[in-house]
Structures are given as structure tokens and as C-alpha cells.
Amino acid sequence: MNTPDSSAHNRRFLRARRHYAIAWVALLALLAASAASGWFHLGIGNLVAGVGIALVKGAIVAWLFMALRDAPPLICIASVAGLAMLLILAGLSLVDFGPRHNETALYQRPQQVPPVLAQAHPVATAADGLRTPASPRREAGRP
């Protein structure tokens, strides 16, 4: 039973499957690029590459898997508001590091503390009635 509606549905399904496959391959390639960037010492370039890769991954997920391209305007506004709040919180976190100064604490040489506590209390022995691993207490009636 091949109706015009079923053929249009099949075309949409094949197109969606192709889009998901392309997105999956792109996300895997970005994952490999993110892992590979850790092996290279690029200085600030590692940070820029990591943030750029994360933005592209987020855009792919939002556009395709969250279906923001077909979403109503209110949903798009809510997602942009969430992104704006994330950026505000990140900006406030970065502002927190601005006034901090790298002041090191004063250094004091370590000194040995005299063993006063050990001299004040005599060492308990097995003769005082304490159980030690060397002299286990035997219960009455047991060998």
C-alpha cells in the first residue's frame, strides 16, 4: 500500500536518518579533535580550541537533537535565556578572579615539638590487666 503520504513519510525518515548520521559522525570527529588537542602544547590555544569545539558540539545538539530549528519562538527564547544566564554566571566567576593577588604566605621553618605528652603518661602494660596481642585473655572453661 504505497500512498503519497507514506512516500513523503519515507523521504522525511530517510532525510532525518541521514541528518542524524552526519551529526553523529561530526560529534565523533569533534570528540577526537578535543582529545587530540590535549596532546599538543599550544598554550592558550588549547583553551580556545576546547571552548570552540564545545560551542560547535552544543550548537549541533541544540539545533538537531533539541529540534530548536523547528521549535516555536517561545521555546527558542527560553533556550536563549538559559544560555544568557550561563554566560552571566561564567562572567561573574571570571570577575571574581580579577581582584585576587598572588600573595604567598610567610614561611616558617618547621620545628620539632618535644614529646611532652608521652612523658606525662606511663605506658600501660599487660600487667595492668590490659589485653595485648602478645597475651590474649582466656575465658574460663575454654582451653
Image (cartoon, helix red, strand yellow):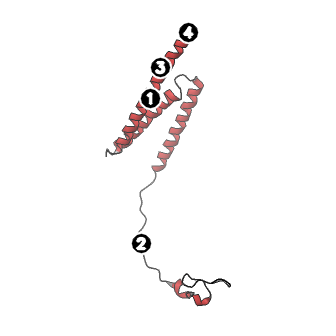
63 or 129, nearer to the observer: 129
SS for callout 4? loop
- Amino acid type at image mark 2: Gln
Cα distance, mark 1 to mark 4? 30 Å
Q: Is residue 1 above or below residue 34?
A: above
Q: What residue would you read off at disc 3?
A: 15
The answer to whether the residue labelled 4 contacts the one labelled 3, judged by CB atoms less than 8 Å apart, is no
Image spot of residue 40 (x, y percent): 31, 44
Image spot of residue 106 (x, y percent): 42, 67
Mark 4 or mark 3: name the one nearer the start of the chain.
4
Q: Residues within 10 Å of mark 1 (few under 14, many from 20)?
A: some
Which residue is rendered at x = 45% and y = 54% of the image?
100
SS for callout 3? helix
Mark 3 or mark 2: name the one nearer the start of the chain.
3
107 or 119, nearer to the observer: 119
Cα distance, mark 3 to mark 1? 12 Å
Cα distance, mark 4 to mark 3? 19 Å
Quadrant for the N terminus in the image: top right
Cα distance, mark 3 to mark 2? 70 Å
Q: What residue would you read off at disc 1?
A: 23
Q: What residue would you read off at disc 4?
A: 3
The quadrant in which residue 104 appears is: bottom left
The answer to whether the residue labelled 2 contacts the one labelled 1, judged by CB atoms less than 8 Å apart, is no
- Amino acid type at image mark 4: Thr
What is the number of the mark on residue 108? 2
